[in-house]
Image: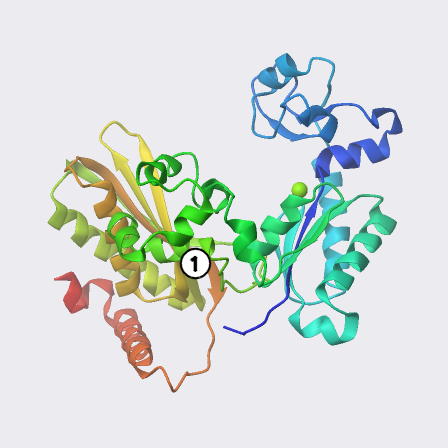
Amino acid sequence: MPADRTILHVDMDAFFTSVEQRDRPELLGKPVVVGAPADKRGVVAAASYEARKYGVHSAMPSRTAYRLCPQAVFLRGDHAKYSRESERVMAILRQFTPLVEQVSVDEAYLDVTASLRLFGDGEQIAREIKRRIRETTGLTASVGIALNKFLAKLASDMRKPDGLMVITDADKLDLLRPLPIGRIAGIGKKTEPVFHEIGIHTIGDLQRFPIETLRVRFGVWADEMKARALGEDDRPVEPYGEAKSISNETTFEKDVSEMKTLERTVWELADEVGRRLRAEGVRARTVQLKLRWSDFTTLTRRTTLPEATDDEGQIAEVAIQLMRRELKEPRPVRLIGVGGQNLLRSPKQLDLLDRGSNRRDDLNRVADAVRARFGAKKLRRGGEL
Ligand SMILES: [Mg+2]
């Protein structure tokens, strides 16, 4: 990991509704909702700051939004127009670095580490980006500047709208300490209570919590959560746009609850995922497990790895760990899926210092060649037997 990176998170303010207010000045200062009509099924895609004051937010049913704020102007929205505006914003960001990772229509990470000599420090670059966005599109953006993606995103969110915030290495721990643990991506409504149970409410609680105990509870995920609490995040900015995924799943003819069979199935599925990742020349940073129970309810669990992988052994191990966490009590499973997400181009150069993993890479490549020639069923690695 490079020692000192400068990462920006650029997030347009109330993007869809700001575009509408720009184009229809009669809407300025008024609560505006883009999404399903107030009297129809469907949800809010975006709410202007004026509407947010009434508690309206995106993903809320439009009917609820109407109940909270009946005077709001409800618009279907013009998504072709939003895409065009988005493209103009992204083009501005690419003026500062090719390392722009667009995470949604109105949000991107930039790694400007190599641009600092040309454009000034992170804060100067952020100011210039905000100025050009305003000049070109008439819209405002909030920018967070930090050493990594996690902190940059946190920073962009702290001064909205039209914000600019820097989080430095020196102030990150103090800044994180009082925040609720839900501010860490991946800790949502369902996981939060599990943390509360063991006395972790704030990120500060998590900073102090012994890692060994966390690992018992959360497995491979513990280290990532702990790192975030300490303000650490070595995920690179990946300029490949929307993450694709490669996955593979199977439905059992009869529901299965026996762990040995489930594990063997995960190995078979992971085997195919690894082969396809290598065939595409990509690696997955995130491993996803999907389980469907006999009542057809489905859950997905995922883990982001410290380093991207195309190794089926590692994918299977992580997926099995996720599965064991869900199956502390045996329960009939109808379907299992294993997937790799968050895909990155594989680096082609060989890292001579890391012989262990290279041997495994070589082994996988040989295995792929054999399978290509003799068919997939011929070859099974030891771990699957
Ligand atoms: Mg936004």
Residue that mark 1 sits on: 227
Q: Relative to 56, does residue 380 appear above or below in the rendering?
A: below
Disc 1 residue type (three-letter): Ala
Q: How is the image coloured?
A: rainbow
Residue 75 left/right relative to 284: right
Query: Which residue does the image show at 84% across and 28% down from the upper left?
Result: 28
Task: Tell me where residue 301 appears, x and y as whole percent.
Answer: 35, 45
Quadrant position of ligand 1? top right
Asked if residue 105 shows in the view, the reply is no
Residue 358, above or below 238: below
Given residues 295 and 49, the one toward you in this image is 49
Residue sitting nearer the eye, 278 or 63: 63
Instruction: Identify which residue is drawn at 28% across, 54% down.
Output: 215
> Which residue is pictured at 31% across the width and 55% down the height?
210
Helix, strand or loop at disc 1? helix
Quarter-wise, where is residue 36 in the image? top right
Residue 272, by quadrant, is bottom left
Which is more toward the observer, 266 or 20?
Answer: 20
Q: Position of residue 270 (x, y in %)?
A: 28, 57
